Amino acid sequence: MKKLILVLAVLFALSSCKNDTKGNSENTTENTEIEGLEVDSTEAAATKSEDKAKEIPAPLQAVFTAHGSLDHWKQMNNICFEMKGKNGDETHTVSLPDRKTKIESKDWSIGYDGKGVWLLKHDLGYEGNPVFYHNLMFYFYAMPFVIADPGTNYTAVEPTELDGKMYNGYKISYNDGVGDSSKDEYILYFDPETNKMAWLAYTVTFKDQKKSDDWHFLRYDKWQEVHGLLLPEKVTFWNVENNKPKDKKMTYKFDKIAATETMLDASVFAKPSEAEYVK
C-alpha cells in the first residue's frame, strides 16, 4: 500500500506541468543559440540557508517581497514549465532543494541526477552543449529568487537608464569555486517604484573561465502569479550595442507552470540506461 501511495505521489508531481489551465501562448524565437551562461548545478549552491537572508541588502529583500517573498520560495520543492526552444517544445522539471534537472523534447532529453549531466538522443539528437544548457533556462526563469543562493555577493550599482527608463540595480558575483563558472556576473535591475525585477544583465564565462566585460541583456516585462509567487510569463533577449540593450532579439514564453511543495523522487532525474554522461 505504501508503494502505491509513493507511485501516485510521483505521478502527480510529474503531471503538474500538464495540468495548468493556461494554454500555449504565442512564442517567437530565432533559430540561434541562446547567449547564456553556465549556472550552478551543485548541491551546495541549492542548500537552503536560514542565515542567507541576513546577508541580502534591504533593497533586494524588497524585490523578493514584491515577487512573493523569499521565505515562500524556499517552501517550494519543485518547479516545472514548458517553453518552445529553437527546435520545438521543451518540458523543464527541477527539484529545487538539490537542483536536479530534466529537460524533455521530441529529439532529446537532458538531465542532471546529482552525479553528472546526461544526454539521451532520439531521432535528431541535441545540437549544442548539454552541460551548458541543462539548467540555463531554469536559472533565467527562477529570477530573482536564485540570486539568494549561498556563495553570492551583492554590490549596488548606480541608477541606470535602460530603454528610456531609470532602474536601480545590484551586481551579483560569486565566491571562487561556486558552481561551474564562478566568474559569471549578473546585474539585476528593478523598478524603483514597484520593486519588481525589470532587466537582467549577465556575462558569459563558460568557455574560458575568465571575467568578462561583454554584457548581455534580458527584459522581464510580463509576470504571472504561480502558487503565490510572481514569476515571468516571458523573457526577451535583446541585441546589445555599447553594453546597453538596443532592440529586441528573441522572446521565450513559459506555459503550464507549476511550483509546489511536492518533493520529487530521485528516479525522476535518474539517467536512463540508453543515455550517456557528458562533459
Image (spheres, helix red, strand yellow):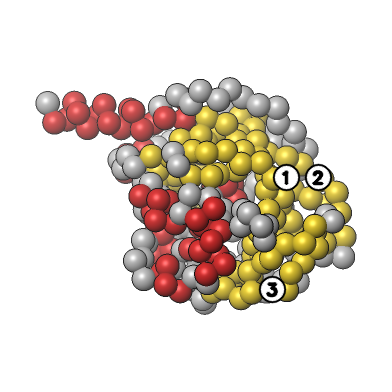
**Residue drawn at point x = 57 percent, y = 67 percent:** 59
Q: Amino acid at mark 2?
A: Lys
Q: In which quarter of the view is residue 232 placed?
A: top right
Is 146 left or right of 96, judged from the image as shown?
right
Q: Is residue 135 visible?
A: no
User: What residue is pinned by disc 3?
Assistant: 157
What residue is at 87 percent from the left and 65 percent from the top? Answer: 242
Percent position (x, y) of residue 89?
Answer: 61, 29
Residue type of the residue flagged with mark 1: Thr
Rendered image: mark on residue 236: 1
Residue depicted at x 63% and y 54%: 194
Label 2 to label 1: alpha-carbon separation: 7 Å
User: Disc count in the image?
Assistant: 3
Which kind of residue does numbered mark 3 sit on? Val
- Ranked by sequence position, the earlier of labels 1 and 3 is 3
User: Picture quarter containing residue 155?
Assistant: bottom right
